[in-house]
Amino acid sequence: MTRFALEANFDGLVGPTHNYAGLSFGNVASANNANRVSNPRAAALQGLAKMKALADMGYAQGVLPPQERPSVALLRTLGFSGDDGAVIRAAARSAPGLLGAACSAASMWTANAATVSPSADTSDGRVHFTAANLCSKLHRAIEHDTTSRVLRAAFADESHFAHHDALPGWPSLGDEGAANHTRLCGAYGERGVEFFVYGRDDLATAAAPRRFPARQTLQASQAIARLHGLNEADVVFAQQHPEAIDAGVFHNDVIAVGNGNVLFCHAQAFLDQAAVLATLRERLAAQGTSLEVVEVSAADVSMEDTVGSYLFNSQLLARSRQAGGGMRLVVPQECRERPAVWRYLESLVASGGPIRELHVFDLRESMRNGGGPACLRLRVVLTDEQRQAVHAGLWIDDARYATLSDWVKRHYRDRLAVADLADPALLDECRTALDELTQLLGLGSLYPFQRVA
């Protein structure tokens, strides 16, 4: 029997150390903006504004806290010693690149936090979470322990939620989370098709990118499907197009986004794309659902404009029946600033297809580091009972938005250069802010520094 369910979005709150250290090879925006001065306060407020706007539209919108940074634990593991200030100063002198990794605020992109399968798809009828190991990048590979603690605190009821540890951090099991996973379905509470996109098959010789690394492996995607108890007939694996990766499409969500029975993608998103789309149509048809594909040609939007605008790193959100149904697309301001992209979007909405409405957000601080609207959120399909079981302090409403905005304004710097990461005071500022945040959200002692006797 189908149960009513909705799709909730949980956005990552940008952390106090948001900076442009240029850590992500293969991410064009990250590389192009390396060593610029960032504005952590503006970044966090931009993200909160998007959360509040979607909550005001009637969507279930939650927030997830940032991680403790700088990660003194990482630096100690790498041989730096002394008190925390001495560790940071020593790393700044002899290994500034490692200090940059230890200060990364990239956990704000919660599309990489985990892969999530709703209860309608899983063998035990629970929502399953697998934290991503993110082992392709040092600054992200250190996230999954805290990510697991956050997810377990947010979704704690074991009768509704199942949590899996991150896969071993071996290259053959590189996992980048929901940024390479899309669920397609007729209704959220019905069984759906889970679409896993990988960059490479680590146990076979196949087409591969030549310029930038492929981060997600087929083996990782297959392991997650098994851990979540998914039916093989309801799972599709597809390879990301190597030429797209080489153009800067480091995750599938930079070139494709799906929701419900709609898939919005570039014509060069997947290897052997016609066969991939045919398989998706066949699997959904077996469930009584017709797939609607909005495929964008290179003639309409070039690969350069795709990467530069983050057109597909948008949120595709179902509109209510009262609003006329169909989908609304949440895009970054950069889409409006690229003439070819904006012309295409205007014609798309006017065409009468499934995407009927546009919303534009200024997420400049996130975009300069290589993350748009879709990067900032983790989607979780929930029944009414499951929604009630989510930690209540994480839902965005007027009061929560006001409290968090005030918290950001009191604790965040409005200017942060890469050289400022050497300031030990930044660690104290971060810990003070996070200690207060866990109290505001009612999460208890979430971070290691809070659990020291």
Image (cartoon, helix red, strand yellow):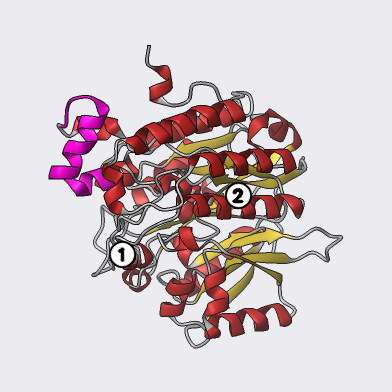
What label does residue 48 carry, if any?
2
Q: Residues within 10 Å of mark 1 (few under 14, many from 20)?
A: some
Residue 319 located within the stretch drawn in magenta: no
**Position of 395 compared to 102: left or right?**
right
What is the magenta range?
80-100
Few, some or many C-alpha atoms within 10 Å of disc 2 (few <14, some 14-19, many ≥20)? many
- Look at the image and tell me in which quarter the N terminus lies: top right
- 173 and 436: which is toward the camera: 436
Is label 2 in a helix, a strand or a loop? helix
Instruction: Examine the rendered structure and indicate whether residue 153 appears above or below residue 91.
Output: above
Q: Which of marks 1 and 2 is nearer the N terminus?
A: 1
Could you say where residue 241 lies in the image, as x and y percent from the top left? Answer: 38, 69
Farthest bottom residue in view: 299
Instruction: Answer left or right for 84 relative to 279.
Output: left
Q: Is residue 88 magenta?
A: yes
Q: Quadrant of residue 185?
A: bottom right
Count the numbered circles shown. 2
Dot 1 and dot 2 residues touching (CB under 8 Å) = no
Q: Main secondary structure of the magenta part?
A: helix
Amino acid of disc 2:
Leu
* Viewer-closest of 204 and 404: 404
Amino acid type at mark 1:
Ala
The local secondary structure at tag 1 comes to: helix
In the rendering, at what x and y percent does residue 4 appear?
77, 43
The image shows residue 101, relative to residue 265, as above or below, that is above
Q: Give the residue at mark 1.
A: 31
Whole-number angstrom distance, CA of label 1 to CA of label 2:
25 Å
The residue sitting at 59% across, 67% down in the picture is: 331
Which dot, 1 or 2, sits closer to the camera? Answer: 2
Whether residue 375 is visible, yes or no, is yes
Res 190 seen here: no
Residue occupying image coordinates x 76% and y 40%:
3
